[in-house]
């Protein structure tokens, strides 16, 4: 609920406040929208299972859950990369920023993220839906996870495993190294700032972004790049939980609610800004 509420507030605020209509906030708004979808794919079913003990789901439900899970996770990876690139240009190339991050390139980054995510997920889900599952019908996770399904299958999974390997590079390794490189440049230019206060502020922003990125790519890496171990269920479930519930919850806090522009817009929209009200009274 915290995740849904936080992301809903951010989305509404960015749509409402004209001063937040910049590439950075469009990307953040896209991320918030995505986080709400990401959390809706797995958590409601998990809550239903814990509440009612009805831990059965049909194969169709399972494949659709997997489809949306892979799609949203992939899009998240691309959006986080786009956001770090946006910050890299803004901090390291401020003069070229309006030229590089214009409306068109921002639209391109977001549309490409959503499209690639859905296409890749379609491919993996179609291939998985054609496998046969004769060994066991018990999923060792709290949602329909591709890795768990592949472990249960008795068909030949070489093709899917190969695609996953390629995916790991395109969706995991490449974006995460791009992101880390952007932040390496950002940190090196932050260190060149002379005022201690400015450096401190920029640094605290960078470190909170980096924490999210390490959490996201770190858990994804541990979950999908490490070879299957038979008795790693508990570890996988804990990591999956960080991945599906914790990250969407802390994203809005880290990317927006600590931000002065967002807080300013929030106080304007909600009318919490007392100074504003006093000046209004004086005018009357
Ligand atoms: C997502 O990003 C695009 C590109 O900047 C923007 O036009 C669109 O309004 C954003 N969507 C949301 C819901 O924020």
Image (tube, rainbow, N blue to C red):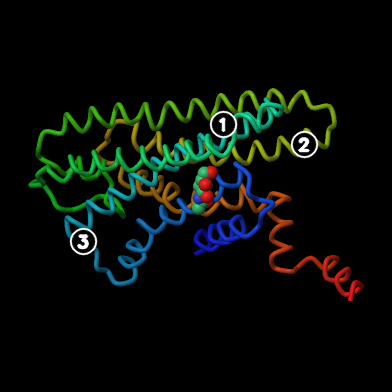
Out of 17 and 219, give the one closest to the viewer: 17
Distance from label 2 to label 3 (Cα)? 50 Å
Marked residue nearer the N-terminal end (2 or 3) = 3
Distance from label 2 to label 1 (Cα)? 21 Å
- Number of other residues with Cα within 10 Å of mark 2, as a class: few under 14, some 14 to 19, many 20 or more: some
Can you say which quadrant of the picture contains the C terminus?
A: bottom right
Q: Indicate whether 75 appears above or below 59.
A: above
Residue beneath label 3, please?
A: 57
Residue beneath label 2, please?
A: 200
Q: Indicate whether 279 appears above or below 39.
A: below
Mark sitting on residue 85: 1
Q: In percent of the image, x 24 and y 39: which residue is there?
A: 124
Label 2 CB, ligand 1: below 8 Å?
no
Kind of element beneath mark 2 = helix
Kind of element beneath mark 3 = loop
Q: In percent of the image, x 56 and y 31: which residue is there?
A: 85
């Amino acid at each position: 609920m915290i995740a849904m509420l936080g992301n809903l507030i951010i989305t509404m605020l960015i749509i409402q406040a004209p001063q937040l209509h910049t590439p950075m906030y469009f990307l953040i708004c896209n991320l918030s929208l995505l986080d709400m979808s990401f959390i809706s794919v797995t958590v409601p079913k998990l809550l239903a299972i814990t509440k009612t003990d009805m831990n059965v789901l049909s194969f169709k439900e399972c494949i659709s859950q997997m489809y949306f899970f892979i799609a949203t996770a992939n899009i998240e990876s691309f959006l986080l990369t786009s956001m770090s690139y946006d910050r890299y240009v803004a901090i390291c190339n401020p003069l070229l920023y309006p030229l590089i991050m214009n409306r068109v390139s921002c639209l391109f980054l977001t549309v490409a993220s959503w499209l690639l995510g859905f296409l890749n997920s379609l491919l993996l889900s179609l291939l998985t839906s054609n496998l046969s599952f004769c060994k066991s019908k018990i999923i060792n996770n709290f949602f329909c996870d591709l890795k768990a399904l592949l472990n249960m299958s008795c068909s030949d999974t070489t093709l899917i495993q190969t695609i996953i390997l390629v995916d790991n590079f395109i969706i995991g390794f490449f974006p995460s190294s791009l992101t880390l490189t952007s932040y390496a440049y950002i940190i090196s230019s932050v260190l060149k700032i002379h005022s201690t206060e400015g450096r401190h502020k920029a640094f605290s922003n960078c470190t909170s972004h980096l924490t999210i990125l390490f959490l996201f790519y770190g858990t994804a890496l541990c979950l999908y790049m490490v070879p299957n171990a038979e008795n790693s269920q508990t570890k996988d479930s804990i990591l999956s939980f960080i991945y599906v519930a914790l990250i969407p919850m802390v994203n809005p806090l880290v990317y927006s609610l600590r931000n002065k522009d967002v807080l300013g817009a929030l106080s304007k929209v909600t009318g919490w800004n007392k100074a504003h009200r006093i000046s209004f009274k004086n005018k009357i």
